[in-house]
């Protein structure tokens, strides 16, 4: 049994003290190799924005703290962290006394999480703690993007294994496309448990997929078994290969499972990335699902 299998799909005892050893790193190349994506020549910029909604530790006097940890991992890291191992790791702080005041305790927790994840993933991982009641910022997706689910609700979609041919030959659009679908579903690579989310696609003018073809393709991800980050890169690569756009952004905003959500975003340039999502100092609203 490898280290991933020893955590995912297994009954695991929650650590009662600070335990960085439970963290599991997964090579990004496990998926990128099959897509012919090379780490030294990435076709995209981007990051993975995580939100851990059950972040808690104790003050020195034993008073619990509560809040949300936002974690931003650059897509250039050689590894991702397996989400269940991160949940176990963050829960290992629950009974740890971290500082004299709630502010000091959460600041110390934030700094230690950043150190441990940066060491694990071999990259500069950003971490920010938000206290309960912190105002959230709307990403503006509802006003800037077209939701295509109900508009295209009468199309036939009968393929549930990823099929790039569903993207079709496309059509010419001078304005490009900015679309959202809340029909994203894929499954965990190891446990095959379902993951639900919202997918956001932005392309510049030129040849773009027809909206009905794009929606059929999104539905075809329903039977795929991949980590969240892998799904985002898969979609980005398929659209890039089919249409060679000069501008492309794909974001997969997954719902929380086990108190954690993962939001990978990939784009042909940093200027296209949803800045509110990538900014570790900004706590955003969810686009529809919570």
Image: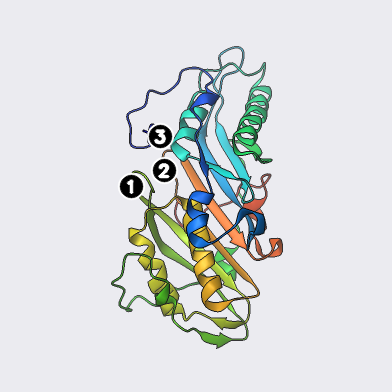
- Which residue is rendered at x = 59% and y = 34% of the image? 120
Mark-to-mark CA distance, 1 and 3:
19 Å
Disc 2 vs disc 3: which is toward the camera?
A: 3
Q: Nearer the viewer, mark 1 or mark 2?
A: 1
The location of residue 83, given as percent across then percent down, is: 47, 39
* Label 1: element kind: loop
Label 2 near label 1: C-beta < 8 Å?
yes
Q: Position of residue 100 (x, y in %)?
A: 67, 16
Left or right placement of residue 120 versus residue 232 in this view: right
Q: Quadrant of the N terminus?
A: top left
Asked which secondary structure carries label 2, the reply is loop
Relative to the observer, which residue lies in front, 43 or 279? 43
What SS does tag 3 mark?
Answer: loop
In the drawing, what numbered circle is on residue 193?
A: 1
Q: Which mark is residue 257?
A: 2
Residue named by callout 3: 2
Count of marks, rendered view: 3
User: Which of the two marks, 1 or 3, is nearer to us in this view?
Assistant: 3
């Amino acid at each position: 049994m490898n280290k991933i299998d020893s955590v995912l799909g297994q009954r695991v005892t929650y650590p009662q003290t600070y335990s960085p050893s439970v963290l599991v790193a997964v090579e990004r190349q496990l998926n990128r190799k099959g897509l012919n994506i090379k780490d030294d020549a990435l076709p995209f910029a981007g990051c993975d924005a995580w939100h851990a909604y059950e972040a808690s530790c104790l003050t020195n006097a034993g008073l619990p703290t509560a809040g949300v940890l936002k974690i931003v991992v650059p897509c250039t890291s050689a590894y991702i962290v397996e989400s269940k191992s991160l949940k176990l790791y963050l829960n290992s702080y629950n009974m740890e006394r971290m500082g004299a005041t709630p502010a000091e305790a959460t600041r110390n927790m934030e700094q230690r999480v950043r150190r441990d994840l940066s060491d694990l993933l071999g990259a500069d991982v950003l971490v920010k703690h938000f206290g309960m009641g912190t105002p959230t910022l709307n990403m503006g997706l509802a006003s800037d993007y077209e939701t295509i689910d109900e508009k295209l609700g009468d199309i036939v979609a009968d393929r549930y294994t990823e099929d790039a041919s569903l993207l079709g030959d496309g059509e010419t659009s001078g304005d490009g496309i900015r679309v959202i679908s809340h029909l994203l579903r894929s499954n965990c690579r190891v446990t095959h448990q379902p993951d639900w989310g919202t997918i956001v696609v932005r392309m510049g003018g030129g040849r773009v997929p027809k909206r009905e073809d794009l929606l059929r393709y999104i539905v075809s991800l329903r039977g795929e078994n991949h980590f969240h980050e892998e799904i985002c890169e898969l979609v980005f690569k398929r659209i890039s290969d089919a249409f060679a756009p000069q501008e492309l952004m794909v974001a997969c905003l997954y719902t929380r499972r086990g108190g954690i959500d993962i939001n990978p975003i990939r784009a042909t340039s940093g200027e296209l990335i949803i800045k509110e999502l990538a900014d570790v100092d900004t706590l955003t609203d969810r686009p529809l699902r919570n």
